[in-house]
Image: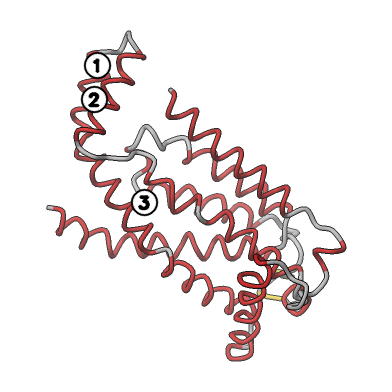
């Protein structure tokens, strides 16, 4: 229970910081001035906005530009994804032993936690490692939001039925964003990891609330990211399993 409470606390804190940082204000709507911008805006938000603009000039659509930038971001965090895959494989191998511990100490939760931690330490497994690829996307979401709101070309653009600077009026994208978040957790094996299982339900709810309230471009990035991660995990997963086997 201690681990689950820790995971829940991390997610709730991250969600609070995300929502607080994304609250729109007149200053956040102003274009970025490289001369006065802070470190975060100058070296992350501004380059992200420029890359989106240049990609849109080539493809003719900010919706497609977001797809390209999403792929770039997912490739950058590939080492974390591989680490998560390694953690998932290790957790799967430990499941029989963990089930024995649950049966043996089913009436003593404290002892169960102690023996489970000893098992993790013995096999050098970190049950929270599988949560890193999801947590790392929260600051990226904030950066995307700021890049969108400070770039009126993106905010005023259309893609499919969406106006990228406004929330989806039909609530289709929030549902897809939440659904793909849940499916990504399943594909990544979180259902088999009791220590990370809370993410399977907390994250989709949080993402639905964000997608419901914030610009469609932000939710579009999240959907693209989820789909790319699932495809990536499908192809790398078999090869990774062969190497581990």
Q: At x 23% / y 25%, what residue is drawn?
A: 99
Please tell me which of labels 2 and 3 falls first in the chain.
2
Residue indicated by mark 1: 103
Mark 1: which secondary structure?
helix
Q: Residue furthest right?
A: 26
Residue indicated by mark 3: 187
- Density class for disc 3 (Cα within 10 Å; few <14, some 14-19, many ≥20) is some
CA–CA distance between discs 1 and 3?
A: 27 Å
Q: Position of residue 10 (x, y in %)?
A: 54, 38
Mark 3: which secondary structure?
helix
Q: At x 23% / y 29%, what residue is drawn?
A: 119
CA–CA distance between discs 1 and 2?
A: 6 Å
Q: Nearer the viewer, residue 103 or 12?
A: 12
From this view, report whether residue 138 is shown above or below residue 58. Answer: above
Left or right: 212 as drawn, with respect to 204 = right
Left or right: 220 as drawn, with respect to 7 = right
The numbered disc on residue 99 is 2
- Density class for disc 1 (Cα within 10 Å; few <14, some 14-19, many ≥20) is few
């Amino acid at each position: 229970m201690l681990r689950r409470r820790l995971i829940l606390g991390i997610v709730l804190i991250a969600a609070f910081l995300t929502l607080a940082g994304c609250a729109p204000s007149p200053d956040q709507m102003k274009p970025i001035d490289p001369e006065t911008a802070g470190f975060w805006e100058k070296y992350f938000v501004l380059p992200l906005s420029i890359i989106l603009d240049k990609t849109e000039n080539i493809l003719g659509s900010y919706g497609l530009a977001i797809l390209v930038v999403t792929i770039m971001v997912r490739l950058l965090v590939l080492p974390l994804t591989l680490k998560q895959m390694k953690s998932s494989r290790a957790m799967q191998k430990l499941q029989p032993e963990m089930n024995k511990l649950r049966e043996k100490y089913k009436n003593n939760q404290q002892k169960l936690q102690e023996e489970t931690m000893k098992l993790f330490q013995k096999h050098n497994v970190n049950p929270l490692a599988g949560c890193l690829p999801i947590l790392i996307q929260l600051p990226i979401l904030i950066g995307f939001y700021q890049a969108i709101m400070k770039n009126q070309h993106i905010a005023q653009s259309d893609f499919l039925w969406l106006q990228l600077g406004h929330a989806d009026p039909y609530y289709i994208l929030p549902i897809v964003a939440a659904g793909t978040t849940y499916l990504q957790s399943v594909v990544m094996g979180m259902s088999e990891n009791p220590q990370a299982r809370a993410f399977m339900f907390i994250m989709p709810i949080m993402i639905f609330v964000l997608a419901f309230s914030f610009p469609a471009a932000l939710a579009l990035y999240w959907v693209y990211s989820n789909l790319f991660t699932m495809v990536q995990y499908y192809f790398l997963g078999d090869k990774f399993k062969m190497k581990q086997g």
